[in-house]
Image (spheres, helix red, strand yellow):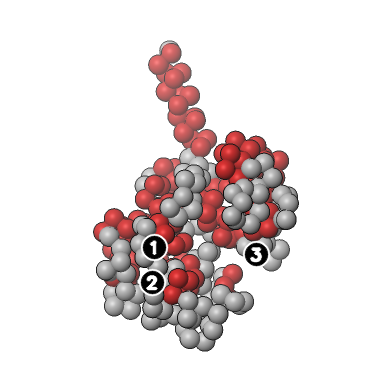
């Protein structure tokens, strides 16, 4: 009876924290792929590129001559993965480039082929493990951001009260109870003008930093944290 109860309890705990589709994937690989998508050269401790990416449009004068920006996957495809159809449809990051959302659920090998091809040019920059992680993120790690963030208002669709409990136990040790740490970064409350970026980092972590990734648990938890961040001081 005790064995049955123990097994049942364990099963319930796993079910509570992880959806079946989440449990089926290598969440560590996917999260690392998300960090590579964010800023691959920081994640792998490589030199910042010195020449602009050949696919980045010259029409975007703000970032066309900034290799450190235009070699980042997110710079063309957006934090929401939707490119021209998402948050980067307009504004200073607009490029007119399509998103990666069309490759969601696809073959990781196809993503690797694109990344290592002459056009994208990552073949001599990323290792086999890096490419695998990136491909896993693109094919199995994308989420429908509209489920968690209102695109029109940018408001997270979360519960700030619940988010506070998670923040105070998981995040506050590094960021402080008011979100103003570390001192070298802006207050977390001030970053909520771009909730898609914060959601991406909440799920995958910060490149080459000791930040926990919340990807392996229900994504609503990260959304609740975002809702709480929106209540924190902006200055």
In the image as oriented, which residue stretches furthest toward the front? Answer: 183
* Residue 25: image location, x then y, percent: 38, 47
Q: Is residue 14 above or below residue 108?
A: above
Is residue 77 shown to the viewer in this render? no
- For the residues labelled 1 and 2, say whether their Cβ atoms are less than 8 Å apart: yes
* Residue 118: image location, x then y, percent: 29, 78
Secondary structure at numbered mark 1: helix
Q: Which residue is mark 2?
A: 49
In the image as oriented, which residue stretches furthest toward the top? Answer: 1
Mark toward the start of the polypeptide (1 vs 2): 1
Closer to the camera: disc 3 or disc 2?
A: 2
Q: Which residue is mark 1?
A: 41
Closer to the camera: disc 1 or disc 3?
A: 1
Left or right: residue 94 compared with residue 67: right
- The picture quadrant where one finds residue 47 is bottom left
Pick whichever, 10 or 223, lies toward us: 223
Q: Which mark is residue 151?
A: 3
Pick whichever, 46 or 64, lies toward us: 46
| Quadrant of image for the C terminus | bottom right
Is residue 7 shown to the viewer in this render? yes
């Amino acid at each position: 009876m005790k064995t049955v109860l123990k097994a049942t309890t364990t099963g319930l705990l796993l079910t509570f924290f992880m959806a079946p589709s989440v449990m089926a994937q290598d969440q560590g690989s996917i999260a690392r792929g998300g960090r590579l998508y964010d800023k691959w050269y920081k994640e792998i401790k490589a030199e910042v590129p010195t020449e602009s990416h050949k696919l980045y449009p010259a029409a975007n004068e703000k970032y066309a001559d900034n290799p450190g920006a235009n070699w980042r996957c997110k710079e063309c495809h957006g934090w929401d993965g939707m490119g021209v159809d998402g948050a980067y449809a307009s504004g200073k990051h607009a490029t007119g480039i399509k998103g990666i959302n069309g490759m969601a659920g696809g073959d990781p090998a196809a993503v690797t082929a694109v990344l290592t091809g002459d056009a994208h040019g990552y073949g001599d920059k990323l290792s086999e493990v890096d490419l695998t992680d990136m491909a896993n993120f693109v094919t199995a790690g994308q989420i429908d951001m509209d489920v968690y963030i209102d695109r029109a208002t940018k408001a997270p669709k979360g519960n700030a009260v619940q988010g506070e409990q998670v923040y105070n136990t998981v995040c506050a040790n590094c960021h402080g109870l008011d979100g103003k740490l570390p001192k070298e970064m802006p207050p977390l409350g001030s970053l909520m003008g771009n909730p898609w970026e914060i959601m991406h980092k909440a799920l995958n972590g910060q490149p080459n930093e000791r930040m926990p990734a919340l990807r392996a648990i229900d994504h609503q938890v990260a959304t609740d944290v975002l809702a709480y961040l929106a209540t924190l001081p902006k200055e």
